[in-house]
Structure formats: structure tokens, C-alpha cells
Image (cartoon, rainbow, N blue to C red):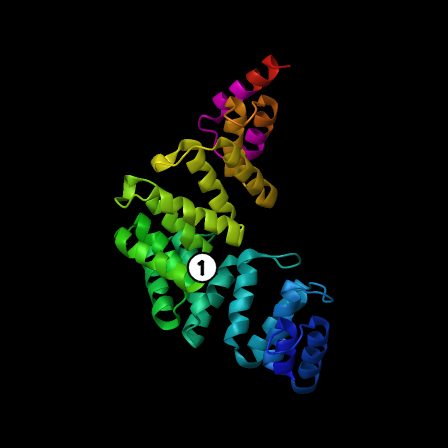
């Protein structure tokens, strides 16, 4: 019953997707057999929502908790950790408990996703979690070795490309990891990471033309906002001899803003509109608005002077 529900939830193997029917089967398996895998499967479906299935994150949490209580299900531990790490409507964020759940999933089930997630948390730091790049590197290495985890390849590539306390910079290995993640899973973050290493000669492996192709691919195949911004920057600056194209850059920044209200894109577009460029009309008033939105919540630095200049431009052009 639970296996059929899984097929109906995801579709495949000649079975048409029918999420509403999958919910019915999961509910029956839970009611009649206290079926743990059905609890987890239903939790995943309710967490995401689907056609004919209303999203219900609070119930998903209850199901994960129940599956953990019944049998210590490792997938439930991991999924609950993800929810608590980010928080959601009706679910209060609890980073400390999330970390504990990831640790448990690793200890009890050698869960690759938990290794990778915990590594990213330790690489970046979180509320109540100290930076520990050395442990992050070890977790990434383990997830790669034991599970071939593509996200771990990309995460370790990021660490090695920058270096950190206790983690020696190794651009050659970082490139190998990015290339593998791209080859095996067309990973968008790996495309961006590799492009940033290749875009100029700071890392000793300049190949701006390939960097542009990687960023284009991340934009077109994955609609990846970070790639839009970096590609726009290259086109504005003419990085590595790339032909400048301010109009295309402006369109990329607009797309990043529309998709995710990206603040870096707002600031870059503000600079283009402030000065104007080939194919980009000067618009100091909109530049000012974008700059204010992009700087919201950030440290000022030289922001006040730039903003004053934008306001003055806008006033003079009225």
C-alpha cells in the first residue's frame, strides 16, 4: 500500500501521478498498520503540497515526530531537521534541535544528506552554531566517499577554492570536484563555483570564455539567480576580455530581481541606471529606489555618499 502510494505521489514506471490518491493510501496504511514509511511519505507530500493536496507543514512535523518515536526512522529525523533548520509557516525555527537531528541521522543511519547539510551549516555558521570548517570538510569528504553526494562535492569545492582556518586552499582539487558535480548531476552551484575560478587570473586558471558558458548554462538550465548576477557583472566589466553588453546585463539583473528580489542585482542595476550605458537609458530616480531596496539591512560603508549622488541626479533631472 505504501509502495503504491509512493508511485502515485511521484509518478513513474507507467503509473500516472495522483497525489490525492497517494494521500488516501498513506492515511489507510497509517491508520490500519501504524506504518512508519507511510508516515514519512505522507509527511513529505504534505510538506511540499501537490495538485489536489493542500500544503500542511504542521501535520508533516507531527508525522515525522511520530515516525521517529515509533522506530527512530532516519529519513524522518533528517526531514524534520531540514524543516526546523529553515522554519516554515506554523513551524518555529529551531537551529539547535535541527543540528542535533542531523547529528543523530549521521550517527544512527550514516545519512549522506545530513552529513552534507550539517557541513554547510558548520561552514557558514548559524545561530547557536560555531564555525567549524575543518569538521565541515571532513563531513563533505565522508558524504562523497560513502554516498557520492553531489552537493558535498560542490560544498567541498567551495571550501577548497577559498581556504579556511585549518583547511588549505586547493584550487586544483576544487576544480576537479566542480567538474565531477557538473558531469554527474549538472549541478548549478558547481557551474557557478567553477565559473568564478575561471573568470579571471586571480586563481591562476583563467578561462573567461568557459566561465561565461558555465554561467549561461546555469541561467538557462536552472534559472539560477546567482549565475544571472555574476554573468551580468562579467558583461558589464568585460572580464577576461569578454565583450561588454550592458543591455544584456541589465536584463539579467532585472530577471534576478523579479525571481528572488536579489539585492546584489538591485545594486548592480542601480549603478547601471545611475550612469547609463550602451543600450541602457539613464534613470536616476529608479536607480535611487533600487539602491535603497538593495541596501536595506546592510552595512552602509560608502552607501550614504552613493545614495546622495543618486538623489541629487534624480532631482537635477526633474
- Where the C terminus falls, by quadrant? top right
**Is 63 rendered above or below residue 198?**
below
> Residue furthest toward the top?
316
Q: Which residue position holds label 1?
A: 186
> Does the magenta-highlighted stretch encompass residue 306?
yes
Is 254 included in the stretch rendered in magenta? no
State the residue at coordinates (56%, 61%). 84
Kindly tell me whether residue 170 is visible in this rendering. Answer: no
Res 32 → quadrant: bottom right
Image quadrant where residue 149 sits = bottom left
Instruction: Residue 159: tell me if it is visible.
Output: yes
* Percent of width and height locating residue 88: 62, 57
Percent x, y for residue 170?
Answer: 26, 53
Element carrying mark 1: loop
Find the magenta span and give its range: 290-310
> Magenta region's main secondary structure?
helix
Left-right relation of 86 to 117? right
Percent position (x, y) of residue 305?
A: 48, 21
- Pick the residue in front: 246 or 201: 246
Instruction: Judge left or right: residue 90 versus residue 213.
Output: right
Q: Which quadrant of the figure has residue 177?
A: bottom left
Q: Position of residue 230 (x, y in %)?
A: 44, 41
Asked if residue 291 is positioned above or below residue 3 in the image, the reply reads above
Q: Residue furthest bottom?
A: 33
Quadrant in which the N terminus appears: bottom right
Amino acid at each position: 500500500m505504501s509502495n503504491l502510494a509512493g508511485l502515485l505521489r511521484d509518478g513513474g514506471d507507467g503509473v500516472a501521478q495522483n497525489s490525492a490518491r497517494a494521500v488516501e493510501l498513506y492515511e489507510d496504511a497509517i491508520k490500519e498498520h501504524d506504518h512508519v514509511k507511510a508516515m514519512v511519505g505522507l509527511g513529505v507530500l504534505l510538506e511540499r503540497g501537490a495538485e489536489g493536496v493542500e500544503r500542511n507543514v504542521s501535520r508533516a512535523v507531527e508525522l515525522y515526530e511520530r515516525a521517529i518515536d515509533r522506530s527512530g526512522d532516519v529519513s524522518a529525523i533528517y526531514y524534520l531537521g531540514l524543516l526546523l533548520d529553515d522554519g516554515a509557516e506554523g513551524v518555529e525555527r529551531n537551529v539547535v534541535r535541527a543540528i542535533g537531528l542531523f547529528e543523530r541521522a549521521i550517527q544512527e543511519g550514516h545519512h549522506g544528506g545530513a552529513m552534507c547539510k550539517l557541513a554547510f551549516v558548520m561552514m557558514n555558521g548559524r545561530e547557536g552554531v560555531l564555525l567549524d570548517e575543518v569538521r565541515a570538510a571532513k563531513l563533505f569528504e565522508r558524504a562523497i566517499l560513502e554516498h557520492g553526494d553531489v552537493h558535498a562535492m560542490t560544498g567541498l569545492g567551495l571550501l577548497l577554492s577559498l581556504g579556511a582556518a585549518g583547511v588549505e586552499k586547493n584550487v586544483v582539487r576544487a576544480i576537479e570536484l566542480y567538474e565531477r558535480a557538473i558531469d554527474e548531476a549538472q549541478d548549478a552551484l558547481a557551474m557557478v563555483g567553477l565559473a568564478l575560478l575561471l573568470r579571471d587570473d586571480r586563481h591562476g586558471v583563467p578561462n573567461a570564455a568557459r566561465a561565461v558558458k558555465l554561467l549561461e548554462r546555469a541561467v538557462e538550465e536552472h534559472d539560477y539567480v546567482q549565475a544571472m548576477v555574476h554573468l551580468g557583472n562579467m558583461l558589464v566589466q568585460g572580464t577576461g576580455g569578454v565583450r561588454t553588453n550592458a543591455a544584456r546585463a541589465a536584463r539579467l539583473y532585472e530577471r534576478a530581481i523579479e525571481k528572488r528580489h536579489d539585492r546584489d542585482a538591485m545594486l548592480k542595476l542601480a549603478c547601471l541606471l545611475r550612469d547609463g550605458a550602451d543600450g541602457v537609458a539613464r534613470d536616476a530616480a529608479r536607480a535611487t529606489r533600487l539602491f535603497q531596496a538593495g541596501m536595506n539591512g546592510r552595512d552602509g560603508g560608502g552607501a550614504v555618499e552613493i545614495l546622495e549622488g543618486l538623489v541629487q541626479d534624480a532631482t537635477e533631472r526633474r
